[in-house]
Image: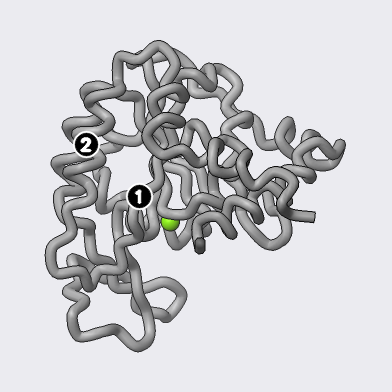
Amino acid sequence: MELLKLLGFCKELLKTRDTEEYQDEVLEKSIELGKKTHDKLLIFDMDETLIAAKFGTIPKEFEKTFAYDLCGTEIQVRLRPYVNDCLTKLSSMYEIIVFTAGQQDYADHILDYLDPDNQIFKKRLYRQDCIKVNNFYIKDLDIVLDRDKESMIIVDNSIISFAFDLDNGVPINSFYGVEPDDRELLFLYSYLEEIKDEKDVRIPIAKSFKLSQMQNSLGSSKK
Ligand SMILES: [Mg+2]
């Protein structure tokens, strides 16, 4: 139910996509990645996908991996289990970039920790690279000019992030840093390994997660 509501909401947001302002912003924010190092591009969200970060009141179960100071606020960060292994292994199969809706000064501390030698992420995209629609930050894959949609996968715990590219999106359960035994990244790794040689990744992704199919079925039942 929750999911259907969310997909209905994404459908509403879609109306914005065809407006001139929106398309101008896509153009304005467009980027190029340059020389291809692997056939497919994997785009990772950061918060609640690769790590959990907290400040203020922190639950007892949250065991920080590291902490840093951001303008006088201590941010505690817990890496998601298996994250280093998962990223290292995936980087031998995919080009990887990170796309966070977080602000750059907040995110860079964490990304520097995850990828100190810039070996994993070919590029880092931040809040300023998202397109804000109704107070939501959309990660529109159209901003990547020199890659095809058929070869892009975005992994994100929020479906709204990839609302305009549902068939490119691999949803992942949110990680809050208090889960006793989180194995989502192991499952994700197996899945991504399985689809890495598909010509058009949207076909297996649409089949596996059925997000656009569910969205289409909403059709005229809504006003
Ligand atoms: Mg997230």
The three-letter amino acid code for the residue at tag 2 is: Tyr
Q: Looking at the image, which is closer to me, 206 or 49? A: 206
Asked whether disc 2 touches disc 1, contact meaning CB atoms under 8 Å apart, the reply is no
What residue is shown with label 2? 189
The three-letter amino acid code for the residue at tag 1 is: Ile
> Is residue 90 shown left or right of residue 167?
left
Residue extending farthest bottom: 57
Using the rendered image of the protein, determine whether residue 129 is visible from the camera's viewpoint.
Answer: no
Quick one: label 1, few (<14), some, or many (20+) residues within 10 Å? some
* Residue at the image point whose x is 25% and y is 40% from the top: 188
Residue extending farthest front: 221
Using the rendered image of the protein, determine whether residue 159 is visible from the camera's viewpoint.
Answer: yes
Residue extending farthest right: 20
* Residue at the image point whose x is 45% and y is 19% from the top: 151
Q: Position of residue 107 (x, y in %)?
A: 42, 56
Please, what secondary structure does the residue beneath circle 2 have?
helix
Q: Looking at the image, which is closer to me, 115 or 2? A: 2
Could you tell me how far apart the alpha carbons at marks 2 and 1 are, in whole angstroms?
A: 11 Å
Indicate which disc residue 172 carries: 1
Mark toward the start of the polypeptide (2 vs 1): 1
Q: Looking at the image, which is closer to me, 77 or 190? A: 190
Q: Position of residue 150 (x, y in %)?
A: 49, 18
